[in-house]
Structure formats: structure tokens, C-alpha cells
Amino acid sequence: MIQEQELLRFLRLLNIVYKEGLSLTQTADRLFKIQIDTEWANNLSINIEMAEQLDAFSARFSRMQDTLGDKLIPSLLKLLAKKPSSNLDNLKT
């Protein structure tokens, strides 16, 4: 029963990461269509649309990274009968 619950949790988390990946890809596609250079970065304070796109990319990237490191990978390790540890150690496993 516990193994089944852990499998369902893993599958739910995998679906969340998939959806987060889609959102991140859409944002990245829009953001990286343009030349990003020093001038672009210096103009972020007056180009609110670009600043918001960069903020959205950063937030979505961070959210996906957190879901992967804090939830999905430890859930996978539990399914594999391994003890989750720190994020760095989990990635070494």
C-alpha cells in the first residue's frame, strides 16, 4: 500500500514537472527570440515587458528546479528503496 501511494505521488509530481517544463519552454521561446546583450539588460528598467518576461522565466525556472530537487527526485529515490539525502547527494546517487 505504501509503495502504491509513493508511486501515485511520484506520478503526480512528474505531471507537475512536465507542466512546469511546458510553461518554462514557452517563456524561454519568447524571451530568447531577441538578442540579449548589455544594452538589453541596461534597458530593462524602461522596457517593462522584457523585464516581466525575464522575471517570469526566472520564477518558472526556480519553481521547476525546486519541484525537481525537493520533491520529484526524493520521491523517485523512495520508490527505488534508497534513502533521500541532500539535493547534491541525491544527484550523485
Image: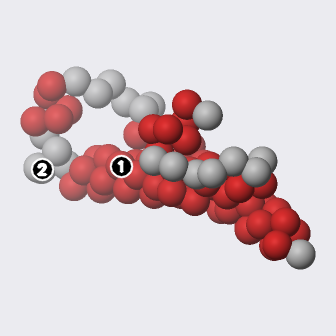
Q: Answer left or right for 77 relative to 1.
A: left
What x and y, as percent, mark residue 24? 52, 48
Seen from the viewer's position, the closer of residues 58 and 3 is: 3
What x and y, as percent, mark residue 15? 73, 60
Q: Residue at x 22, y 55 (%)?
A: 48
Q: Is residue 16 above or below residue 54?
A: below
What x and y, as percent, mark residue 33? 44, 31
Q: Is residue 88 above or below residue 6?
A: above
Q: Which mark is residue 58?
A: 1
Q: Residue at x 78, y 48 (%)?
A: 80
Q: How many marks?
A: 2
Q: Answer left or right for 61 relative to 54.
A: right
Q: Which mark is residue 41?
A: none
Seen from the viewer's position, the closer of residues 23 and 16 is: 16
Of mark 2 and mark 1, the one earlier in the sequence is: 2
Q: Which mark is residue 46?
A: 2
Displayed quadrant of residue 1: bottom right
Pick the quarter of the image with the C terminus: top right
Question: Quick one: SS at disc 2?
Answer: loop
Q: Give the residue type at disc 2.
A: Ile
**Pointer 1 local density, CA inside 10 Å: few below 14, some 14–19, many at least 20:** some
Residue 65 seen in the current view: no
Question: Quick one: SS at disc 1?
Answer: helix
